[in-house]
Image (spheres, helix red, strand yellow):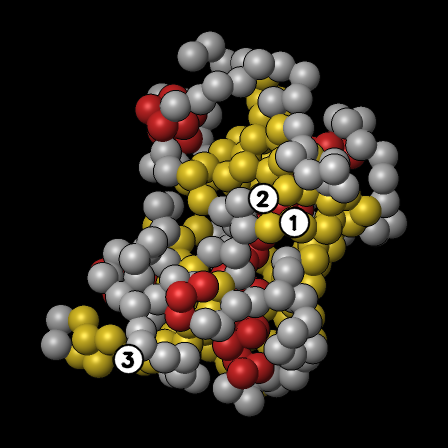
């Protein structure tokens, strides 16, 4: 099977063309491919498939390194756009892709940066999903006897955003692991730790469900900016500083889509036998 290794700000992917070659992966094969010692190594595996909608160009599927399939990955979407253009699978300026969370619109600028329309964020607990009786600006959950406050939002996948004073000192590994699989999140969640630097810049670390902490999380960056704007802490254009680099996030408020702009890089290509 042919594959391409890519990354978006250090959030790394195996990208596979399932349009021109036969691909049928099970969870065990995904885990093998994602293994950094015995396989290729990645945070997520991305499949480029034929579209299921008449107006779409492709179907975009995402698998975490634990073998589970998820609905959304922002950094992966940028790599997806770069991949289909570099492989000459599509030459459109705007690429429409089907996902299990709805459609995304991807575009590559003349500067090589990729812009993704990530869709309209969802706040209703049932749509996140979140076990809560009603929608609140801030939710609380008890972890190891301590009350943890967070903002919840869906970017096609569930996110909880915690506002911290110093992201470098935040307990991302320990608290992120406990919150990711907490019973309040029936489908688990991505846990973001956000430090507000000023109204146009934040620092962010994300513990991703099924992958632990990654160097960057595109949908997590979108969720953090949405949470910060909802709390009155941020303006509509925000630079998000992640361990792997920076993303530009734009959001005009409720009812509007979130726009994410950032790089996508090809590392190498190869063949692997399963």
Residue 129 appears anywhere in the view: yes
Can you give x and y, in whole percent of width and height, for residue 84 in the image? 73, 32
The residue carrying mark 3 is 140
- Residue 32 against residue 98 in the figure, above or below: above
User: Is there a contact, CB below 8 Å, between mark 2 and mark 3?
Assistant: no
Q: Is residue 124 left or right of residue 268?
A: left
Q: Is residue 1 left or right of residue 97?
A: left
Can you give x and y, in whole percent of width and height, for residue 4 in the image? 60, 26
Neighbours of disc 2 within 10 Å: few (<14), some (14-19), many (20+): many
Residue 206 appears anywhere in the view: no
* Spatial CA span between label 2 and label 1: 6 Å
Q: Quadrant of the N terminus?
A: top right
The residue carrying mark 1 is 103
Neighbours of disc 1 within 10 Å: few (<14), some (14-19), many (20+): many
> Looking at the image, is mark 1 or mark 3 nearer the viewer?
1
Q: Quadrant of the C terminus?
A: top left
* Spatial CA span between label 2 and label 3: 31 Å
Camera-side residue of 181 and 41: 181
Can you give x and y, in whole percent of width and height, for residue 142 in the image? 19, 75
Q: Which mark is residue 48?
A: none
The residue carrying mark 2 is 99
Q: Residue furthest bottom?
A: 232
User: Is there a contact, CB below 8 Å, between mark 2 and mark 1?
Assistant: yes
Residue at left 46%, top 77%?
A: 195
- Residue 34 against residue 254 in the figure, above or below: above
Camera-side residue of 121 and 206: 121
Within the image, what quadrant is residue 218 found in?
bottom right
Q: Secondary structure at mark 3?
A: strand
Residue at left 37%, top 34%?
A: 67
Q: Residue furthest top?
A: 273
């Amino acid at each position: 099977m042919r594959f391409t290794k890519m990354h978006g700000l250090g959030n790394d992917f195996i990208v596979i063309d399932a349009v021109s070659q036969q691909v049928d992966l099970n969870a065990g094969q995904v885990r093998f491919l994602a293994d950094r010692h015995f396989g290729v190594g990645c945070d997520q595996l991305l499949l480029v498939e034929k579209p299921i909608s008449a107006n779409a160009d492709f179907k975009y599927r995402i698998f975490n390194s634990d073998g589970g399939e998820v609905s959304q990955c922002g950094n992966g979407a940028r790599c997806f756009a770069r991949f289909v253009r570099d492989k000459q699978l599509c030459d459109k300026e705007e690429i429409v892709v089907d996902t299990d969370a709805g459609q995304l619109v991807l575009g590559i600028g003349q500067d090589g940066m990729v812009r993704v329309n990530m869709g309209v964020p969802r706040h209703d607990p049932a749509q996140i999903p979140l076990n809560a009786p009603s929608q609140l600006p801030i939710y609380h959950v008890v972890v190891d006897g301590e009350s943890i406050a967070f903002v919840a939002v869906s970017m096609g996948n569930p996110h909880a955003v915690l506002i911290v004073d110093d992201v470098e000192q935040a307990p991302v590994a320990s608290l992120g692991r406990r919150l990711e699989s907490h019973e309040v999140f029936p489908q688990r969640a991505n846990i973001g730790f956000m430090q507000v630097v000023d109204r146009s810049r934040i620092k962010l670390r994300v513990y991703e469900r099924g992958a632990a902490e990654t160097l960057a999380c595109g949908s997590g960056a979108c969720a953090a900016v949405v949470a910060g704007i909802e709390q009155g802490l941020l303006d509509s254009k925000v630079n998000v500083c992640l361990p792997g680099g920076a993303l530009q996030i734009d959001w005009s408020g409720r009812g509007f889509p979130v726009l994410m702009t950032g790089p996508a890089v090809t590392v190498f290509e190869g063949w692997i036998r399963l």
